[in-house]
Amino acid sequence: MTLSLTCNHCKLAITGEDEDELVVNVQEHVGEHSRAHGVSHVVTREQVLHRLRRQQEKEAAGRNE
């Protein structure tokens, strides 16, 4: 099952076939943004997975309305 998160800055859907791939793809995407702005920012695996869970909860709540 493909997982995805939407970038808060550019609204791009970042995808991965599983949690491991999604985490790597999000970390790369965030790195690209931070380098473009001349800063260094690292997103941890825990941060990505926490955001994924929050997004999934919101989506599930929307389906139950």
Image (cartoon, helix red, strand yellow):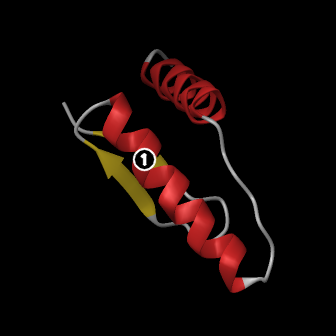
Q: Is residue 46 left or right of residue 63?
A: right
Task: Tell me where residue 8 sits by quadrant.
Answer: bottom right
- At 53% from the left and 19% from the top, the residue drawn is 61
For this orientation, the residue located farthest to the left is 1
- Whether 3 is drawn above or below 35: the answer is above
Q: Is residue 18 left or right of residue 25?
A: left
Q: Is residue 8 left or right of residue 45?
A: right
Q: Is residue 22 left or right of residue 30?
A: left
Return the residue at label 1: 24
For this orientation, the residue located farthest to the front is 40
- At 54% from the left and 22% from the top, the residue drawn is 53
- At 75% from the left and 59% from the top, the residue drawn is 41
Decide: few, some or many residues near mark 1? Use Cα within 10 Å; few <14, some 14-19, many ≥20: some
Q: Position of residue 24 (x, y in %)?
A: 42, 47
Q: Where the N terminus falls, by quadrant? A: top left
For the residue marked with disc 1, what is the amino acid? Val
Q: Position of residue 22 (x, y in %)?
A: 38, 42
- At 61% from the left and 61% from the top, the residue drawn is 30
Q: Position of residue 6 (x, y in %)?
A: 51, 54
